[in-house]
Image (spheres, rainbow, N blue to C red):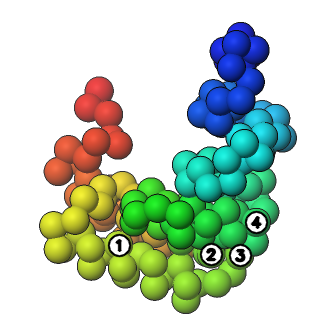
Amino acid sequence: MGRAHEVDPLSRQITVEWGWASYLMHNNDEAAAHIRQGLALDPNYAQAHHRLGLVLLQQHRYADAIASFQRAIDLGVFYPQGASALAVAYAGAGNRAAALQIVKDLERRSTQRELVPPVMIAFAYGGLGDATRGLAWLKKGIDERDIYIPEN
């Protein structure tokens, strides 16, 4: 990623992807720094706000994660990954009511033929500490061959 960034240091996508790679390697401080550099290049890059939220969630910085996820959602169309992560951040911050409201909205959308992967609902219930519902949605994801569940 470093070489790509040298070639195009003003690419928001390369900068944010470098941050994402750092996140996947559990280098959260480095990840946040790169993602923030990407946001400095384009403050309206929704994916960068979402990924920064994931880094902040990993660091248990719930209020900052909530703000980042909410900004990502405000900038784009609804996407279940963002809503699910926002629910987990609210749960981590102790705002169970807000988290449950988001989960109920995800469940409602899933019954209306919107693309809401069951794993995203399972993730949100996991953040709420509700293993029973989380596992039920995970099983539903397996049964439906959710794209987020590898087959092997």
Task: Say what amino acid the circle numbered 4 marks.
Answer: Asp
Q: Is residue 102 visible?
A: yes
Of the residues under marks 4 and 3, which one precedes in the sequence? 4
**Residue occupying the point 25% across, 47% down:** 146
Residue 50: image location, x then y, percent: 59, 54
**Residue occupying the point 82% across, 35% down:** 30
| Label 4, label 3: how far apart the Cα atoms are | 10 Å
Of the residues under marks 2 and 1, which one precedes in the sequence? 2
Residue holding disc 3: 93
| Label 2, label 1: how far apart the Cα atoms are | 15 Å
Of the residues under marks 2 and 4, which one precedes in the sequence? 4
Q: Mark 2: few, some, or many residues within 10 Å (few <14, many ≥20)?
A: many
Q: Does the residue at mark 4 contact the one at mark 3 (Cβ under 8 Å)?
A: no
Q: Mark 1: few, some, or many residues within 10 Å (few <14, many ≥20)?
A: many
User: Is residue 140 or residue 59 the one in the foreground?
Assistant: 59
Task: Say what amino acid the circle numbered 3 marks.
Answer: Ala
| Label 1, label 4: how far apart the Cα atoms are | 22 Å
Task: Say what amino acid the circle numbered 1 marks.
Answer: Leu
| Label 2, label 4: how far apart the Cα atoms are | 11 Å
Q: Which mark is residue 106?
A: 1
Residue 78: image location, x then y, percent: 39, 66
Occupied quadrant, residue 64:
bottom right
Residue holding disc 2: 90
**Residue occupying the point 53% across, 79% down:** 99
User: Can you say whether 50 is above or below 104 in the image?
Assistant: above
